[in-house]
Image (cartoon, helix red, strand yellow):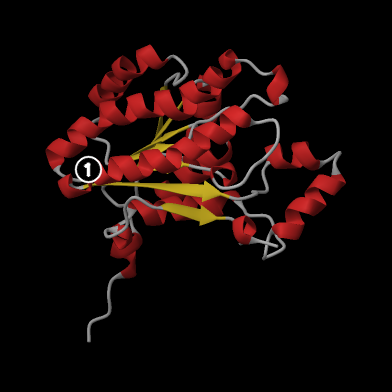
Amino acid sequence: MTLPNWSQAFGLAGKTALVTGGGSGLGLAIARCMASAGARVILAGRRRDVLDAAVADIGDMAVAETIDLADVDSVAATAAGILERQGPIDILVNNAGNTVKKPFEQSTMADFDQVFDVHVRGALELTRALLGPQLERGTGSVIFTASMTSFIGQPMVLGYTASKTAITGIVRGLSAEFAGRGIRVNAVAPGWIDTDLFRAATAADPARKAKILGRIQTNTLGQPDDIGWACVYLASPAAAYVTGQTLVVDGGGVIGF
């Protein structure tokens, strides 16, 4: 019996991936892993200096493009320019995000819109712009970054919670609409990941960190590459029969005791 070729099944050679928020944090980890799997990666974000540093870190497999998803009305034109300069995009990772943290009674609809514009409206406009060429080719992969707040409640981040919960519905809806036309749509939901942001948020709050670790079944924080490799899988031929799903990568945190 001939064994399957794992490098072909899980590899992304010959593919081009665009990762929003790709200059830092989880976006950079996703881009690094996809480049390691053979993809050419386009790091997209607002801060050109951060993007250029990330490109230098990854090397020849990466290029940078600026985009401001919060400026929803500009996204389609920006995406058209990216397609003109970079050519067809096989994989879109809608990873860019932001948040506003404050008690609900002090929050405003402007706070809510500030978060929703990036996570939902901006991401959908970018998806719409890049989906057309994918449909013409009859193949493509779209991945959204969901969150633990897609499944559990956390205080003082209602806009973030609502937007990340919306993503799970968007994934199901877009998959139902486009799976039959060759486009797979999925999401990855990171758990608590050992990033600079997490360390800053818990450094002065050991009780919060202990509470978090107490519900993670592996009793460990995740690493950024855990999310990167999950995205590689979802974008790869190995996941050809996977669509409409949200893959939770959390060490068992969302079901933990």
**Residue 26: x percent and y percent?**
55, 41
Q: 108 or 30, which lies in front?
A: 108
Q: Specify the quadrant of the image occupied by residue 181.
A: top left
Give the SS element for disc 1.
helix
Residue at mark 1: 178
Query: What residue is shown at x 51% (from left), y 48% (from top)?
Result: 189
- Is residue 111 positioned above or below 35 on the image? above
Q: Specify the quadrant of the image occupied by residue 226.
A: bottom right
**Residue 7: x percent and y percent?**
33, 64
Question: Do we see residue 12 in this rendering?
Answer: yes
| Left or right: where 7 falls relative to 22 | left
Q: Quadrant of the N terminus?
A: bottom left
- Is residue 47 positioned above or below 92 on the image? above
Q: 108 or 38, which lies in front?
A: 108
Q: Quadrant of the C terminus?
A: bottom right
Q: 177 or 185, which lies in front?
A: 177
**Residue 101: x percent and y percent?**
69, 26
| Residue at the far bottom in the pictured view | 1
Query: What residue is shown at x 44% (from left), y 21% (from top)?
Result: 69
Query: What residue is shown at x 20% (from left), y 38% (from top)?
Result: 134
| Left or right: where 20 falls relative to 214 | left
Question: Do we see residue 86 in this rendering?
Answer: no
**Would you call the spot at circle 1 few (<14 residues within 10 Å), some (14-19), or many (20 or more)?**
some
The number of numbered badges drawn on the structure is: 1
Q: Amino acid at mark 1?
A: Phe
